[in-house]
Image (spheres, rainbow, N blue to C red):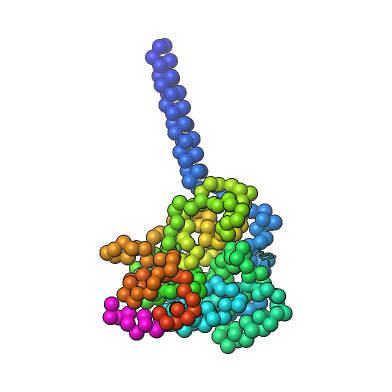
C-alpha cells in the first residue's frame, strides 16, 4: 500500500518536472523566435509588391543564363553622377556580374523633367528599374522589398546578390573569389550588427516608435550599406515580409525577415588578420589595404573614379 503511494508520488513528481521543463524550454524557444503572425492586408499594403507598378523595367536583364552575381544599387533619381561613376568602376559589365540601379519616383513625379532625363538615361543604358513610389529616405524599406520581389520574379536563378549603395567602393574580384567557396543557400553576409536597439529619440534620423516596434532589441542584421546573399533568399525574404510590420530601417527590416526564416547573417573575416571585409565606414584610400577588403563606403563619384583608376592598374602588385 505504502509502496504504491510512494510510487505514484514519485511518478507525479517526475511528470510535473518534465512538464515544467517542457514549458520553460518552450518559453525560451518562443523568446528566441516568436511565432510569426501574418499581417493584415492593410498592414502589408505599404510593402506589398502588388501595390506598385514599374515605370521603367528591364525584365530580361538577367538573360537565360542567370548571372553569378547581381549588384543591386539603390540610388536616388537625381544621382546621375553616382550612377555614372558606378558604371565605369566596380559596376562595369563583367563576365560574372550584372549591375542594376533601383529607384522610385523623383520629386514632381512622372511628368517632371527629372523623369524625362531618367527615361533617356534608361534607354541609353538599359540598367534602370523604377517603381512608382516616392523615392525618400523613409521609403527605403519599400525600395528594398521591391528589389527582393524583382529578383524573385525576374532573376530567380542568380547565384548571389549584393545590395550595395552607390557611394561604395566594391572590390568585385575579391568578392567573387570568396563567393566561389560560400554556401549556395540560406547565406547572407556583410557587416553584422548583433546588439542593435531602436532609437526612440524624436530627432533621430533612425527613430523607430514603440508603436512601430515595441521590442527593446533588434535581431542580428547586416548593415544596409552593402551586403551579399545567396539568390534563394530574395524570394524567401519577400515571402517572409508578409509576417513583418514595416519599419523605416530597411536593413533592420531585412533582419526581421531573416529571423522569421531562421537564417543567421554571418561575418566575413579576412585571413589571417580576422579583419572585417565589409568596412561600413569611410577609409582613406590605400591600394593594398583595399585589395584585401570587399567594401568601404562614403565616397563621392569623383573620388571613386580616381581610386578605381589606380586600383585596377595596381591591385595585382600588392
Ligand atoms: C512612400 O511612398 C508612398 C508611395 O508613393 C507615399 O505615399 C508615401 O508618402 C511615401 N512616404 C514617405 C515618408 O515619403
Ligand atoms: C531557373 O532554373 C530552373 C531550373 O534550372 C529553370 O527551370 C527555370 O526556367 C530557370 N528560370 C529562369 C527565369 O531562368
- For this orientation, the residue located farthest to the bottom is 124
Could you tell me residue 109's position as x and y percent? 70, 75
Magenta stretch: dominant secondary structure: helix
- Place residue 172 in its image quadrant: bottom left
Is 104 or 136 nearer to us in this picture? 136
Q: Residue at x 61, y 76 (%)?
A: 77
On the rendered structure, is 175 left or right of 128?
Answer: left
Q: Which quadrant would the C terminus be assigned to in this image?
A: bottom left
Which region is colored magenta? 308-318
Could you tell me residue 247's position as x and y percent? 60, 57
- For this orientation, the residue located farthest to the top is 1
Q: Residue at x 72, y 79 (%)?
A: 111
Q: Residue at x 62, y 82 (%)?
A: 118
On the rendered structure, is 195 left or right of 148?
Answer: left
Q: Is residue 62 magenta?
A: no
Is 310 or 10 nearer to us in this picture? 310
Q: How many marks overall? A: 0
Amino acid at each position: 500500500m505504502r509502496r504504491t503511494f510512494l510510487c505514484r508520488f514519485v511518478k507525479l513528481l517526475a511528470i510535473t518536472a518534465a512538464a515544467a521543463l517542457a514549458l520553460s524550454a518552450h518559453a525560451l524557444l518562443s523568446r528566441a523566435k516568436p511565432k510569426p503572425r501574418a499581417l493584415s492586408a492593410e498592414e502589408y499594403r505599404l510593402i506589398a509588391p502588388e501595390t506598385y507598378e514599374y515605370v521603367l523595367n528591364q525584365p530580361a536583364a538577367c538573360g537565360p543564363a542567370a548571372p553569378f552575381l547581381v549588384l543591386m544599387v539603390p540610388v536616388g533619381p537625381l544621382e546621375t553622377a553616382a550612377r555614372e561613376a558606378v558604371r565605369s568602376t566596380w559596376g562595369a559589365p563583367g563576365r560574372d556580374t550584372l549591375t542594376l540601379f533601383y529607384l522610385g519616383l523623383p520629386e514632381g513625379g512622372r511628368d517632371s523633367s527629372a523623369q524625362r532625363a531618367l527615361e533617356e538615361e534608361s534607354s541609353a543604358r538599359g540598367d534602370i528599374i523604377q517603381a512608382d513610389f516616392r523615392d525618400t529616405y523613409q521609403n527605403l524599406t519599400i525600395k528594398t522589398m521591391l528589389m527582393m520581389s524583382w529578383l524573385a520574379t525576374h532573376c530567380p536563378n542568380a547565384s548571389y546578390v549584393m545590395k550595395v549603395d552607390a557611394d561604395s567602393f566594391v572590390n568585385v574580384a575579391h568578392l567573387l573569389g570568396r563567393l566561389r567557396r560560400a554556401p549556395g543557400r540560406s547565406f547572407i553576409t556583410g557587416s553584422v550588427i548583433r546588439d542593435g536597439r531602436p532609437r526612440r529619440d524624436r530627432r533621430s534620423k533612425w527613430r523607430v516608435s514603440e508603436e512601430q516596434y515595441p521590442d527593446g532589441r533588434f535581431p542580428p542584421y547586416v548593415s544596409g550599406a552593402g551586403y551579399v546573399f545567396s539568390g534563394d533568399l530574395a524570394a524567401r525574404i519577400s515571402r517572409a515580409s508578409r509576417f513583418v510590420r514595416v519599419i523605416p530601417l530597411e536593413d533592420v527590416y531585412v533582419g526581421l525577415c531573416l529571423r522569421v526564416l531562421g537564417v543567421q547573417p554571418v561575418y566575413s573575416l579576412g585571413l589571417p588578420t580576422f579583419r572585417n571585409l565589409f568596412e561600413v565606414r569611410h577609409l582613406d584610400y590605400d591600394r593594398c589595404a583595399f585589395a584585401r577588403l570587399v567594401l568601404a563606403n562614403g565616397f563621392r563619384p569623383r573620388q571613386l573614379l580616381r581610386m578605381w583608376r589606380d586600383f585596377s592598374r595596381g591591385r595585382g602588385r600588392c
